[in-house]
Amino acid sequence: MGTHTKRGACVPNATALPVALLAALAMALPAIAAEPPTPTEGDFVLRDFRFASGEVLPELRLHYRTLGTPRKNAKGVVGNAVLIGHGTGGSGAQFLRPDFAGELFGPGQLLDASRYFIVLPDGLGHGRSAKPSDGLRARFPRYGYADMVEATYRLLTEGLAVDHLRLVMGTSMGGMHTWVWGERHPDFMDALMPLASLPGPISGRNRVWRRIVLDAIRNDPGWAGGDYTTQPASLRTAAGLLFLMGSNPVLRQEQMPTLARADQVLDESLAASLRTMDANDVIYQVGASWDYDPAPSLERIRAPLTAVNFADDLINPPELGILEREIRRVPKGEAVTIPFGPATRGHGSHTLAVLWRDHLARLLERSGGTP
């Protein structure tokens, strides 16, 4: 069981967000459809949380934001809850910006907060949830995506009394978690929408950039096995790789048409990111995908699923054909690739709801409509 606290709403400044997200948000579309509603924030503490590794954390704090009110349907279960998972290094706060919340959560919009109960957790190891930089450093239990999904499941069921989800969706890492949700808890949701992810193991270039980040920090003498007193210089390499992978080359060229401008944009982005990043947190966050591979169990997914990827995504490039091949094994699965265009932002397109909200509308309709 766990303990529960709530407090007033607070939306962090954009400079507190990770560099990959900052890059995407800085290039976001100017479409502002509605003023995002104000969330309620709280913390839920899980006692003696056991990780898949067998390690136990006496107190695992999970931070969350919610909008709206849970309501039970005719069957006596919550029928209007929506879970949205963030990407690597991010937090639930990223979904409160106008290009996401302003397109989805306002009056009359697809996930109108007056009709839905929207849950935006900070995943285990992220945001204001328990993480290595809280004090344990490299002695923090090694966690994987299965641990992250299990912790969030317990937050929902034990902390928020949510016994069913109308929709599970997520971006990047949150998209990968969406596949895991569909397999581990196939009857817990009505619909699934993974954004910017692939239903297969971390491999190829996706593994390479992660290994470079991990090796750069771990092989840096300044890391000191996690017991550094100042952030190791290698954290700059990690931030640079996140910046590189987060957008598309055409947009980068438009933003940085000269050598001097490229150096300026990169330096500004790195400076903003390094103010908030922590090397141990980054190692755990980037490395948490070690146990991710939904491919063997895709047939277990029962809920209607619409997977959305982007043609200019450097992390999940469509030419691999993985999504198109594996979606055939999902009984009610559909796959969509948004074409490259002036509005897309590479991997960061996942947070621009205007690009894919029509596909969300169709998924909601084919999975039961408005609660």
Image: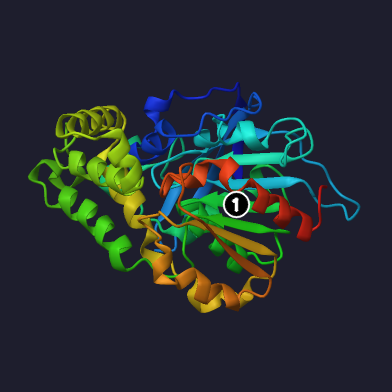
Relative to the observer, which residue lies in front, 280 or 216?
A: 216
Quadrant assignment, res 97: top right
Task: Report the colour scheme.
Answer: rainbow
**In-image side of 269 versus 222 (left or right):** right
- How many numbered discs sit on the rendered protein? 1
- Does residue 165 show up? no
Relative to the observer, which residue lies in front, 285 or 99?
A: 99
Quadrant assignment, res 263: top left
Which kind of residue does numbered mark 1 sit on? Answer: Met
**In-image side of 123 versus 89 (left or right):** right
Residue 195, position in %: x, y?
53, 54
Q: Is residue 210 above or below residue 113?
A: below
Relative to the observer, which residue lies in front, 239 or 290?
A: 239
Residue 266, position in %: x, y?
23, 34
Q: Is residue 203 above or below residue 134?
A: below
Q: SS at mark 1?
A: strand
Mark 1 surroundings within 10 Å by alpha-carbon count, few (fewer than 14), some (14 through 19), many (20 or more)? many
Q: Residue furthest left?
A: 221
Residue 7, position in %: x, y?
60, 24
Residue pictured at 59% horizontal, 41% vertical: 354
The residue to which callout 1 is attached is 169
Relative to the observer, which residue lies in front, 8 or 367?
A: 367
Residue pictured at 36% horizontal, 45% vertical: 247
Residue 309, position in %: x, y?
50, 57
Residue pictured at 50% horizontal, 78% vertical: 296
**In-image side of 356 versus 253 (left or right):** right
Quadrant assignment, res 161: top right
**In-image side of 27 versus 296 (left or right):** left
- Does residue 14 show up? yes
